[in-house]
Image: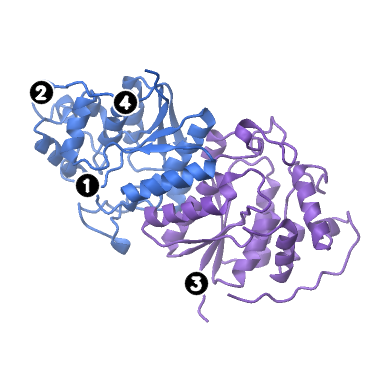
Chain colours: A blue, B purple
Amino acid sequence: MTREPAIVVLSGGQDSTTCLAWALRRFAPVDAITFDYGQRHRIELACAAEIARRAGVRRHRVVAVPSLADLGRNALIDSGEAPAALGASGERGLPNTFVPGRNVLFLTLAAAWAWQQGIHHLVIGVCQTDYSGYPDCRAETIAAVERALSLGLDWPLSIHTPLMHLTKADSIRLAIAEGAWEWLAYTHTCYDGAVPPCGVCAACRLRARGFAEAGVPDPLLVRLGVTEAAPPPCAPSAPAG
Amino acid sequence: MTREPAIVVLSGGQDSTTCLAWALRRFAPVDAITFDYGQRHRIELACAAEIARRAGVRRHRVVAVPSLADLGRNALIDSGEAPAALGASGERGLPNTFVPGRNVLFLTLAAAWAWQQGIHHLVIGVCQTDYSGYPDCRAETIAAVERALSLGLDWPLSIHTPLMHLTKADSIRLAIAEGAWEWLAYTHTCYDGAVPPCGVCAACRLRARGFAEAGVPDPLLVRLGVTEAAPPPCAPSAPAG
């Protein structure tokens, strides 16, 4: 079977890492693109590079987007404000971790690179199940962006969102099924940028809840010696296609 | 009448300058945003600043977008290749002056700034009448981008394109009607970046044809002493709204 090439938007978190594993079983070659938009926790960029290396992607590009930090200050960028608790909302009902237009911008830049390389497939780890008030993670938004970019580039693009309708626990089960188990040990989630993770911020609690519901230990915590070592969970090979 | 605020995408060319004048009669306050994406002709940025100053916009921001130069090399960015002649097409039938995703990216960043400021209106000088193979200038693309951004930001945005269905000559008539006549003397069009303009590149010829069809001299050429001084054309006041 001849596979088509794809580009994965890789942030260095568990969701995009799961998507990378998912893509590697369905597309070839796979490239990864990571955006440096002035995020407070530079560790995310190091995690993305480490995961790209372990996954053996063809190319991994880190693209600087200074303008986003400039135009859309928020709690993930501007270190003066702490990210809000899970479910809390700030201005206009959106969490203060909302970076306006972030995923639209990332997909636009990924699409420009795809066009340049003759690639039709983009993969991104957005999810509306654990929808925390991010309007750019909804299926409806992604479909509209897919259409806007396909028209704007005159180039048919498919934006794949394998996590869109999964719970956090289901995402973890998918990661295991797709062979991403070991890579999750190198992902970063904590809003506080702490290593080991703080365990109390909204992002840490969401992650912990997912692993608890999936019934497996978090390999990051195992690697860091925070929780006891456990045998890797059973990893059935995922069906391709 | 209370007017709503708007942001105009200002490149420093005659089309965006005309749009700025159009916006100033319909919105208040008006901000302008210019993108530095590594364009070969830095003079465009100086022109945009001069026009913003003359027009008296509330704020003029110049936003660096290094990633576009990085991801989408083409003849307007990479100085190794000359822009193609008018109507000539390069890779995949597109002119080699096509920067993939340029207008989608610009509108996304302008929308992020609009969201931050509580603004619902964007104005951009794209035009599909003189459509030279730029898919991101079509009305269909702009409508799709408007929808994608409104959904992605959860914020209703209107993208106004006053030149969309005008010929170049009609655009010049609109500039005169909107009071932009004098500002056109400070715009830049030439692909060669020459001052006075080269007069032979595709962009210069399109501009010259527009002024010829509109039956007025180009105020830039008048200012530079290339053509004879002429009285400014009659500038009827445009209807507001």
Mark 3 burial class by Cα count in 10 Å: few <14, some 14-19, many 20+: few
- Please tell me which residue lies in front, A86 or A73: A86
Question: Relative to B83, is A39 on the left or the right?
Answer: left
Name the residue beneath numbered marker 4.
A51
Mark 4 burial class by Cα count in 10 Å: few <14, some 14-19, many 20+: many
Name the residue beneath numbered marker 3.
B4
Q: Are marks 1 and 4 on the same chain?
A: yes
Marks 2 and 1, Cα distance to the nearest angstrom? 28 Å
User: Could you tell me which chain the residue with mark 2 belongs to?
Assistant: A
In the image, residue B10 sits, relative to residue A207, either above or below, namely below
Q: Which amino acid type corresponds to the residue marked 4 in the rendered image? A: Ile
Which numbered marker is on residue A130? 1
Q: Are marks 1 and 3 in contact (CB under 8 Å)?
A: no
Q: Nearer the viewer, mark 2 or mark 4?
A: 4
Residue B65 shows in the view: no
Give coordinates of residue A162: x percent, y percent: 28, 36
Name the residue beneath numbered marker 2.
A229
